[in-house]
Every structure is written in structure tokens, then in C-alpha cells.
Image (cartoon, rainbow, N blue to C red):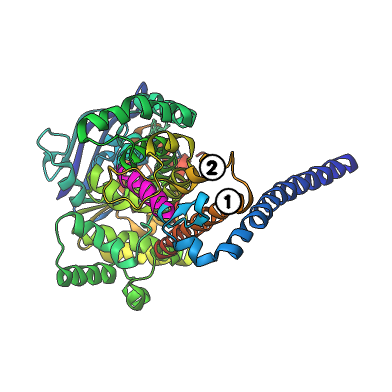
Amino acid sequence: MNKIEVEDLNVYFGDNHVLKDVNIEIPKNNVTALIGPSGCGKSTFIRTVNRMNDLIPSFRHEGNVLLDGVDVYNHKMDVVDLRKKVGMVFQKPNPFPKSIFENVAYGLRIHGINDNDSLSARVEEALRSAALWDEVEDKLENSAMGLSGGQQQRLCIARTIANNPKVILMDEPCSALDPISTTKIEDLIHKLKRDYTIIIVTHNMQQATRVSKYTSFFLNGEIIESNLTDKIFIDPQNKKTEDYITGRFG
Amino acid sequence: MDKNRINEFLIEKGLFITAIFSIMVIFVIILFILMEGLPAFEEYGFFNFLFGLAWSPNHGEYGVFAMIIGSLCVTLLSLLMAVPLSLLCAIFMAEVAPNNIRKILKPVVETLSGIPSVVYGFFGLIVLVPFLRESFGGTGFSMFAASLILTVMVLPTIISISQDSLRAVPHEYREASFGLGATNWQTIKNIVFPAALPGIVTAIILGMGRAIGETLAVIMVVGNVVQIPSSIFDPVRTLTANIAIEMGYATGLHYNALFGTAIVLFLIIMILLLVANYIRYKYKVDIGGGYL
Ligand SMILES: Nc1ncnc2c1ncn2[C@@H]1O[C@H](COP(=O)(O)OP(=O)(O)O)[C@@H](O)[C@H]1O
Ligand SMILES: [Mg+2]
């Protein structure tokens, strides 16, 4: 079953035609990896799904981005609600300059949960799901800025999970992390895919093979090939895909 | 290579000497004020000077307490009006206004801070004082008139520095907040504003410094009566005004007492700065960072 279906999506930043006739289906409760050289539009694509591109004045789009069959750009869509359902983890860990607890509680607070008991319970649950609880349990009131990069990124994942999303978008979540932290995040992704539909942008082909079931290859704003990850890496159908994954360009 | 090293050496030493020189100038000034002011404390008694209610050089009375109150009241009242106003304005300029409006507003605000204080004072004297006289009775020369003028004078300082520190908050924080479904206002209130707070406190400190030190514009509208005010429409005298008004003809102990007034002003400013810096430091540590 598909969680997200994108039909003939074109995206422009002013005169810059960034995504061209993109069609893709994202299956529910699986990990889909997006690979491709820098500047080919991977970030732009995932930011279209939770409408983060709305923040950019020159952004314009055509086509449909269906989440559970409903176009996220339809005029009745509540963007606040959409972003609650479609969480996002960024390339550089970006915890707020607040306590660890408040980082996770923030999303809950802005969505109207203020009762201390339920906040505590849900913060703990989210931190456990993000495999961070054991490391921070006795310093929840400390500033999140004191955590290591890997811990900060897991905190950002916890913050996203706390909102109870259906989809998690990850934009190169490990590119600023060391190998050990990267492994922890990858393990976490394996654990999360049971409950969430995950789209992960990655520069690292090994990472794509390790974490994802499906992979799409982007090049110059077009999707060249989408398939099972195993198929794409073992037997790419398109010459450009083959060139990219064998490291001949990009 | 060698030439570079010599250049480097000269520049380094040159900067060092300039820095030392400016610090020395400040020390010489402080030393001079202390030397001229301390005799007043010795002769009149420090506590009598500080807490005495009567300032009457003709009768040898030199109590500055009413003027301490005057300075503090005028400053606090003006901050009470200026801080909310300028923070809202800074938030509007930094977060809400579209780029082209910001491009117009920023230089306008910066120009405001370049207007000489005599112009503000003159405006107060010609427009504000008569207006207050007609609206609220009395002479119009009052603590309130001075506070209003000071409000306008400190607005640009607080606005531009707060605005800079709001805009220095990394874009990543906003993205994270929007990504969690926060609205623009929620993001400003809960994320951007707290992250910018150390810088905003700095802005308020500088505004406060300007208000408490302002002399000319205040003299022109404040009434300069040495008394503890019972309402904001009463005339008062500030410490700065006291020095400026009487310095021209003061001799002997009177002359020393004016320098004593300067020492008191200096102490007050030091205490306010220390308190404000402590708050800023404490807060910065608490949030683990902070952007100026
Ligand atoms: N905020 C923006 N404004 C204008 N153009 C942008 C913006 N963000 C990205 N682009 C353009 O969109 C294209 C795709 O960028 P991006 O989606 O970030 O690529 P990727 O994530 O694959 O490296 C690039 O040509 C880039 O210049
Ligand atoms: Mg990118």
C-alpha cells in the first residue's frame, strides 16, 4: 500500500525548473532512499511533501503530492496538521537551545498538550523510541547543546516522533556524524520503519543498501529509476544509474 | 617574508599602543573625577551626600538623594515605554516585514539615532511641554515629559541591536520549529525570541545607559526642581542635569559636590551594568548558547 503518491510534480524556484515530471510511489511503513548528486533536487523533493518549500517566496509547483490519497497542496489542507503528520529530520542536527526535555516537549506544547504528566510520559516514550533515553534520563533538564552530534540528531528524531507522525522525512541525517553515531541512527531507522513511513536522502550508497527497501535515483531534477534497493544496486536498468552507483560521476 | 614579519610586528604593536592609550585616557578621567569629587564626600559625609534630601549650595547643603530618585524614575519610566515598543518593532522588522519594507525601515531607524539630542529637547520644549500643560495641567515640565523624549531617543538603539540579534538566530531553529508544525508567531515567541534574548538584554542595557546619561534634552523638559516626585507629572532634577546646570558658576565645595554627583552617577551606571550583565550571563548559561 502506498502512503505517498506523487504525480507529475514540477517545482520551480523563480525561473529555475528544479523538479521535472517527478512520479514516485512511497510504500507505507518502509524505508525509501533517495540518491543522486548534489543539487539534483532531493531536498527540494522531500520538502515538497511537508510543504517546507512554502517558506521560500519564489517556490511554485504543478502536479499532485498525495498523502493517503489527499493532495497536500489542496486549499483545505491545514499545514500545521500536515507537518505534524509528516515530520522532518535535517542534515545538521538542530536542537533548540533549550533543555533536552523542552526540545521533545516543544512539539507537544505547541499542539496544545500542557499537562505535566502526559508531557513527561510522552517525552520519555519518544526518547525511548529514539534510543536516547538511557543516555539522557538523568539529565533531562540539561541544555541540549551539551549533547554530542549523534545524540543531538537522535534528539531531533525523538522531537519528531513525539508528534506522532505517520511519515518521517530525513535529509542526509548522518552526513554530519561520525561512523559510530551513524550506525546508531541506522539501527534506529530499522526499528522505526515498523511504525513509520520513512524517506531518507543519502549521499552514501552503502547507507542506502543498509537501511532502505526501495531506492529512487534523482538526476538533474528527474527521477531516472525507482526500484527495490537490491535491484537498483545489483542490476540497474538505466545506464545513468549504473554510472552513478559505480562512482563514475556525481 | 621578512617584510611581512616587520609589518605584522608594527601593526600588532600599533594596535596595542592605541588600545592602551584609550584605556589610559579613561583612567585619567576617572581619576580626575575621583580627585575632584572625593573632597565633597569627606567634608559633607558620604551618607549625608547620598541620602540627604536638601540640595542648596547657598546654605551649604549637598544631598543628592532626590536627584538619584529623579534619574532612576525618568530612566525606568522611559524604559517601561521604550522596551515593549522597540521589541515589537524589532520583531516586526526582523521577522514579519517583507524584505523591501525592512530595507526602508532599517536606515530610517538608524538615522533617528543620529539626531542630536538638542533637537529632541527642542521638540519637547516647543510641542510636548505645552501639550502636557494643556492636557494634564501644571507647567508641563515634568518627569513624564522627559521620559517621553527619552523613549523616542532610546528606541533606535534598542530596535537596531535587538533586530540584529533576532536576525542572527540560525535559520535552522526556525526550520525545525516550522517542521514540527509551529506557526510563525509560535516560532518567534518560543524559539527565536528566547534565543536572541542575551542580545536583546544588551540592547536594553545600552538603551538604559543612553537614557540615564542623557543631559541636554532632559534639562530642557524635566523642570529641574530638586524634589522627590509624587506623580509622573511633577518636575524633577536628574543627576546629569544637576552637573550641567550648576557647573558654570560652582566654586569650592559646591564644585566638588558636582563631581561627587558624577561619582554617584558613575556608581549607579556600574551597578546597573553589573546586574544586567549578570542576568545576561546567567541566561546564556541556562540556555547553553545564545546569539548576539
Ligand atoms: N531556497 C532556494 N531558492 C532558490 N533555489 C533553490 C533553493 N533551494 C534549492 N534551490 C535550487 O534547487 C536545486 C536543487 O537543490 P536541492 O534540492 O537542495 O538539491 P539536493 O538536495 O539534491 O542537493 C538547486 O539547483 C538549487 O540551486
Ligand atoms: Mg540536499
Residue B116: % across, % down: 49, 29
Q: Is residue B69 magenta?
A: yes
Residue at 50% across, 56% down:
B62
Between B209 and B156, the residue placed more toward the observer is B209
Are both tags, 1 and 2, on one chain? Answer: yes
Residue at 44% across, 34% down:
B217
Q: Tell me the quarter of the picture where residue B46 sits.
A: bottom right
Badge 2 sits on which subunit? B
Question: What residue is pinned by disc 2?
Answer: B246
Q: Which amino acid, mark 2?
A: Glu
Q: Is residue A215 magenta?
A: no
The magenta stretch is B67-84
Q: Is residue B55 positioned above or below B233 on the image?
A: below
Residue B67: % across, % down: 43, 51
Question: What residue is pinned by disc 1?
Answer: B254
Residue at 49% across, 56% down:
B61
Count of numbered circles on the image: 2
Ligand 1 rendered quadrant: top left
SS at badge 1: helix
Residue B53: % across, % down: 41, 58
Between B110 and B260, the residue placed more toward the observer is B260
Is any atom of residue A57 visible in this view? no
Contact check, label 1 and label 2, Cβ < 8 Å: yes
Q: Residue furthest top?
A: A15
Residue at 29% across, 63% down:
A102
SS at badge 2: helix
